[in-house]
Image (cartoon, helix red, strand yellow):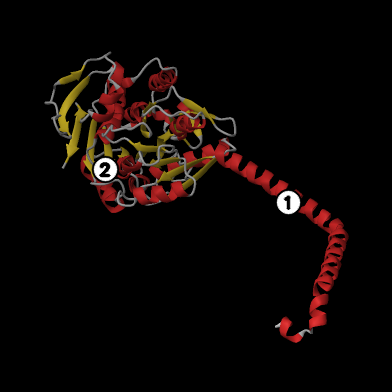
Amino acid sequence: MFSKILSKNEDRKMPRMLLLLLLLVLALAMTQCTSSGGDDGDSDDAADTTETTDTADSGDTTEAADDTVTLAIEHFSVIEGTTWSGAHNRAGQRLADKYDNVEYVFREEVGPDVAVPYAEELIANGADIVIGNAEFMGLPLEEIADQYPDVYFGSIIASDLSTKRNFIRLFPRQYQALYLEGLIAGALTETGNIGIVSAFPSVQVIRRTNGFVLGVQDAAEMLGKDVNIYVKYAGDWFLPPEERGIAETLISEYNVDVITQQTDSGSPLDVAVEQGIWFVGKDMDIVGFYGWADTDTVAVSFDTRWEVLYDQMINEFMAGEQNPETVLYLGMESSITLADGTEVTTVDIMNDGKVGIDAISPAALPSIPQEIVDLVAQRREQMIAGEWDPFTDHAFISNGTGLELEGLPVPAAGEEVKPAGEVPTAEWLLSKFNFDLQGVTILE
């Protein structure tokens, strides 16, 4: 366009003019760069500062993220109003309080069909340790353990003991505290009848019940009592109406004056309050932590500190352990110091914030002979020291009832399965203790 408009003379002048224009533009550009150099210098300094800060923050955040361990618990039930999931939830909170670099997250009411997708969602959001707090919904986590080799997975044990390098199975030796509860219950009963509202036959349930039974029987023998122990199953862990009905039946038809449970609702406790009989609690200090009833009804509870087991997993994870211990079965010999300096064992008897013999209800204490109180104190101290265990000390005589497992029938009534003084293996207790001990009546 320009060549058509410009004259030939002007066309010949073009190179000279272009040179002048280019020089002028260059000069202006140099001036602009120089004049704005101070501003850009400040701006660059600010940018550098921002970048440095961002980089430092980013570095700190990354480092913090690398150092942070996120514990994720999938609760099979709701948390509020339950002792089982309530104890797991409290454990997560206590560990987050204890460690500056531990975070706790959770999901409630997780069934086996959603355990895996929820776990993957939790992992995507930073979870390092994922727990299924019941076996039936924790076992599916094994399916994805290989896909997430840097994540620890955990599941509660009911009877299955399958593991992988990063799929950990765990359970506390609750039977130790249940034995102590049994001593107290056996001393308290005046009718000679003790009732247990239970969920359903399983190795986990049977094993815990047997710990309680041994305590009752030792107290009865020491005090020269004849004591009957009645067990009736509700069919599941959390069935409040059914649990209430069973508790009422045990009192009205079997004259029990001490009742406990292997279920999760508060219905059996409600019945004990209404009927004015003694109640023995499970999983948590229901008076001290939940304010359920008071020590006029609750003679004692056992308290489970899942944080002791989770703490071992967290410390192994922090240490970068690629082959953590895959079966954790800890008892009263193991403990943790909480953020407030309190040391708690894996399980213990507890009531209204007190532990040990101080946990025995002040209202119940006058009805318990001193020799039983002394024995509770002695056995507790011995178990904390790792010097005594009810399942080692006692013979296991089958009641002829229980749960037949594949390849493992229920031993005949009266059969001695384990002699007194023999130490049962953790594997056997966790997966093969499928029979009730002699002296229990299982109600239809």
Amino acid at the residue labelled 2: Ala
Mark 2–mark 1 Cα distance, whole angstroms, equals: 61 Å
How many labels, in total? 2
Amino acid at the residue labelled 1: Thr
Spot the residue most to the top. 421
What residue lies at 51% left-to-right and 28% top-to-bottom? Answer: 319
The quadrant where residue 403 appears:
top left
- Horizontal and vertical percent for residue 111? 32, 50
Closer to us: 191 or 107: 107
- Horizontal and vertical percent for residue 283? 39, 38
- Horizontal and vertical percent for residue 167? 36, 35
418 versus 90 height, above or below: above
Closer to us: 59 or 255: 59
What residue lies at 48% left-to-right and 26% top-to-bottom? Answer: 335
Q: Which residue is mark 1?
A: 50
Q: Which residue is mark 2?
A: 199
The quadrant where residue 421 appears:
top left
Closer to us: 101 or 340: 101
Q: Tags 2 and 1 in contact by the CB under 8 Å rule?
A: no
What residue lies at 26% left-to-right and 34% top-to-bottom? Answer: 160
